[in-house]
Image (cartoon, rainbow, N blue to C red):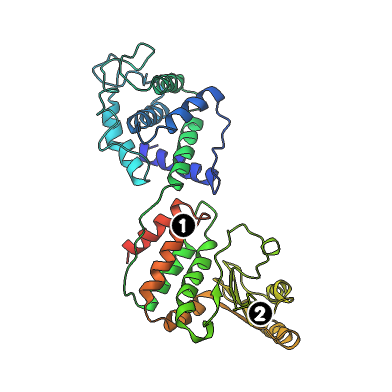
Amino acid sequence: MEPTEFLEKIYNESMAVVGSDNEIKSDLDSTIANHLLEILGRSESAKAVITVILTSSVYKKLNPDQDIRNHQTSIPNGYSGRTFDSKFITPFLKSVKFPAMAESGWLTRSLEQKVPYDSNYSGAIRPDSLKTAFLQTIDFIQKGKDIDKLLSFLFQGLIIQRNAQQIDLAKPLNLPIATIIDLLSKHFDTKYSAEGASRLPVLALYAAYQCLINETKRFEGKVLLPMESHTSADSRSGRIGDIDIVDEKERAFEAVEVKHGIPITAQLVKDAFEKFKTTQVNRYYLLSTANIDASQADEINKEIERIKNIHGCHVIANGLTNSLKYYLRLLSDTSEFIENYVNLIEIDTALKFEHKTEWNKIISQM
C-alpha cells in the first residue's frame, strides 16, 4: 500500500470513530496512551515531534524490517526519515489541517541529531516529559506491535483538537438566489463523518428569519427567539419548533420545524400538532430537505385542514428549498442572509470542523 493511501485509510477510519464525540476511543496500552496524550497536549508547540512520530509509525508499518530509530542514512542501517516525511507525511498533515512543519519535522535542531532515537539520544527535546514521551513512543513503534492503534489514537486526538478550532469562513456577496440555493443544497447534502449535518438547514432558515424579522410587516413587534441547542428536546425546553417567533406578550406566533432527509408524512403533521395544540400559534411550518411524501399528499392536506378547523393554526408542509427560495425573494439584500448563515455556522456547537471547511470548499468551487 502506498504511504498516502495508508494515511488516508487510517484518517478516514479515525474520523468515523470520533464521529461527533470529543474523546479518544482506543484500547491501546495505557502507558503508551499517556505518552501520546503528552505529545498531543503539545501538538502546536511540538509539531516536529508529532511529525517524526507519524513518520516513524507509517514507515515501520510499511517497512517492518527497518529499525526506525536509525532515522538518517548516515546512521548505520538507517533510512531517510526526512525524505519520507517531506514527500508523504507533512503534505498529508497540511491537507487535513493538522499541525505541520513548513517542510519537515527533521528541520528542527532537537530532532536532527545524527544519532539513533534511543535512550541515549542527546537531542534537547523540551520539556523532559515530552522527550520521555517521544523516546518511549519511538521504542514502542520499533517493536512493531499495535501501530494501527497508535496511529488511530493520534489521529483521533488531532481530529478532536482540530474540531475545536475557529475557522475563517467565506462570505460571498451579491449572489443570485439560484446560486445561494445551490450552495446551501450542496452544504446540506454532503456526506459527513460527524453528526450535525441536520443542523445546517435549521441554521439556514434561522438566518433567513434574522433578516425577515426586521424587513417584513408580518413580524412587526415580534421577537425571534434565540436558537436552542441541537440536543434540547422540545418537551423539556417548552419550545414548539426548531425556530420560534413570539408576539409582544411572549405568546407563540410562528414556528418552524425542520426535517433533514426525512419526507413529510401525515404522521409528522400529527406529531407537530401535539407540540403546539395547547398554544395559540398562528402559523406552523413543517419543512424538509426531502420534501413531501407524494404518496401521502392527500392525507397530509386532510390533516392540515383538520388542524385548521379545530385549532385555527395554519400548518404549512413544504420542501425546505422551496421555502428558502421564497424567503430569499423577500429580502432586500441576500448578502445579509449569507453573513447570518456563516456566523451561525461559526458559533454553533453541534457542528464540527468538516461541516465548516466544507462550506469554504463549496464556495471555492463556484
Q: Quadrant of the C terminus?
A: bottom left
- Residue 95, percent across and down? 34, 46
Structural crowding at the residue carrying mark 2, measured as other residues with C-alpha within 10 Å and reported as few (<14), some (14–19) or many (≥20)? many
As drawn, the label of residue 84 is none
Left or right, residue 47 beside residue 129: left
- Residue 106, percent across and down? 27, 27
Amino acid bearing label 2: Val
Left or right, residue 26 beside residue 355: right
| Above or below, comparing residue 261 to residue 269 in the picture | above
Residue farthest to the top? 120
Question: Residue at 42% of width from left, 62% of height from top?
Answer: 343
- Residue bearing mark 1: 347
| Above or below, comparing residue 134 to residue 365 in the picture | above
- Residue 79, percent across and down? 29, 22
As drawn, the label of residue 281 is 2
Structural crowding at the residue carrying mark 1, measured as other residues with C-alpha within 10 Å and reported as few (<14), some (14–19) or many (≥20)? few
Question: Residue at 49% of width from left, 86% of height from top?
Answer: 217
Looking at the picture, tell me which residue is in the foreground, 48 or 239. 239
Question: Residue at 51% of width from left, 79% of height from top?
Answer: 323
